[in-house]
Image (tube, rainbow, N blue to C red):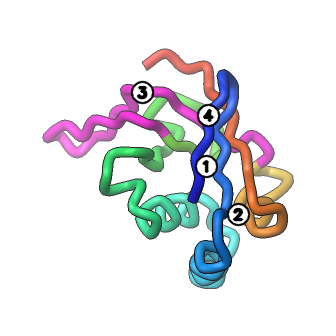
Amino acid sequence: MKIETTSSQLILAIESSKERETLEDIKDRVGHDDVRFLSDMLDEFGLLGNGVLYPILPEHVGALTQAPMLSDDVEYPDDGDTIARGQVWWYPRYEIEDFSDVLLATGRVAFDRASVQV
């Protein structure tokens, strides 16, 4: 999984047929639950456990949305909360299309940089 960042977006791109097969397996398992798809995808490609990207929930940054979101820096205090400390990206078209469908259909998908103060 290739990760590119611009000043306004984080782009995820499929790099091989093996990655596509893995993503299709995840999609078959989670269906239209893009929040879970994001978490499983990051975990499967070793991005979650290696401190590269973390799935977050909108309430972790005070957002009023149900969009899939991720951050590049997250803190997990002892009280069980999750605090996004780094840059946050979100998928704004979540009500119209699943980002997982776009990723599988085109080989890449863009998350927009969120303008949140953390």
Segment colored magenta: 71-93
Q: Name the residue under label 3.
A: 86
Task: Tell me the distance, in whole angstroms, between the alpha carbons under discs 3 and 4.
Answer: 14 Å
Residue 102: x %, y % from top left: 80, 60
Amino acid residing under circle 4? Thr
Say which residue appears at 67% left-offset and 44% top-offset.
Answer: 11
Say which residue appears at 76% left-offset and 62% top-offset.
Answer: 107
Amino acid residing under circle 3? Gly
Q: Nearer the viewer, residue 89 or 17?
A: 17
Task: Tell me the distance, in whole angstroms, between the alpha carbons under discs 1 and 3.
Answer: 16 Å
The secondary structure type at the circle numbered 3 is loop
The secondary structure type at the circle numbered 1 is loop
Q: Compare marks 1 and 2 and give the one earlier in the sequence.
A: 1
Query: What is the residue that sits farthest to the left in this orientation?
Result: 78
Q: Compare marks 3 and 4 and give the one earlier in the sequence.
A: 4
Image quarter where the C terminus lies is top left
Q: Mark 2 points at which residue?
A: 100
Residue 62: x %, y % from top left: 50, 28
**The quarter of the displayed image where residue 31 is located:** bottom right
Q: Compare marks 2 and 4 and give the one earlier in the sequence.
A: 4
The secondary structure type at the circle numbered 2 is helix
Check whether the beta carbons of the residues at disc 1 and disc 3 lie within 8 A of each other.
no
Q: Mark 4 points at which residue?
A: 5
Query: What is the residue that sits farthest to the top in this orientation?
Result: 117
